[in-house]
Image: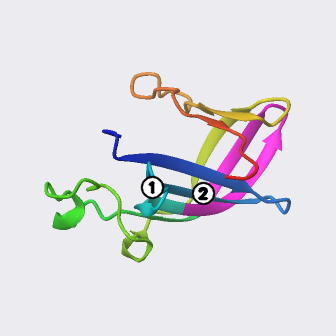
Amino acid sequence: MNGLYEGYHIFEFKEDGTYIGEMAARTLDTKELIGYRGIEEGIYVINENKITMTRTKGFSRNINDPSFVDDNSPFPTFVPKDALIPDNGPQEIYYWIADDFSELRFICPENSADYCVEFTTYIKVTNP
């Protein structure tokens, strides 16, 4: 992102069928945390090569807050964790999952061809 920072999105899948997710950013040089776009937790189910993730709790930025976009800040879209606000209820999202669990690729919902872009691919990282 303009050579200043890198955004990242991490999912951690637990053996009990739950997951946690984090969307944040850190500086390129020191890897220092800049702030968050959102955090979530939920449950997941794997069926063949498809994983269904159901968010049960989420927190995101308050886009109505006037400080959300500060033209004087190099990082206007990230906030401290305690500035995140509760997000709306459950949401299902689907990913194709590689046979060796090395990759997740976003699957657009049915009837969303006009506005959905299948661009998100996650790779497995064991020690970030």
Q: Amino acid at mark 2?
A: Gly
On screen, residue 15 versus residue 85, left or right, reads right
Tell me which label, 2 or 1, sits earlier in the chain. Answer: 2
Q: Is residue 101 rendered magenta in the image?
A: no
Q: Give the total number of marks visible in the rendering.
A: 2
Label 1: how many Cα within 10 Å (few below 14, some 14–19, many 20+): some
On screen, residue 30 versus residue 68, left or right, reads right
Taken as a whole, is the magenta stretch helix, strand or loop?
Answer: strand
- Give how far across and how far down residue 17 sits, in percent: 80, 58
Along the viewing direction, whichever of 96 and 77 lies nearer the viewer: 77
Can residue 64 be seen in this snapshot?
Answer: no
Label 2: how many Cα within 10 Å (few below 14, some 14–19, many 20+): some
Give the quadrant of the N terminus. Answer: top left
Secondary-structure class at tag 1: strand
Q: Amino acid at mark 1?
A: Arg
Residue that mark 2 sits on: 21
- Give the quadrant of residue 36: bottom left
The structure residue drawn at horizontal position 85% and vertical position 32%, both measured from the top left corner, is 100
- Give how far across and how far down residue 37 sits, in percent: 41, 57
Q: Is residue 25 above or below residue 87?
A: above
Disc number lying in front (2 or 1): 1
Q: Give the residue furthest to the top.
A: 113
On screen, residue 104 versus residue 115, left or right, reads right
Q: Is residue 128 above or below residue 98?
A: below
Can residue 11 be seen in this snapshot?
Answer: yes
The structure residue drawn at horizontal position 36% and vertical position 74%, both measured from the top left corner, is 83
Secondary-structure class at tag 2: strand
> CA gap, disc 2 to disc 1?
16 Å
Magenta residues (range): 40-55
Residue that mark 1 sits on: 26
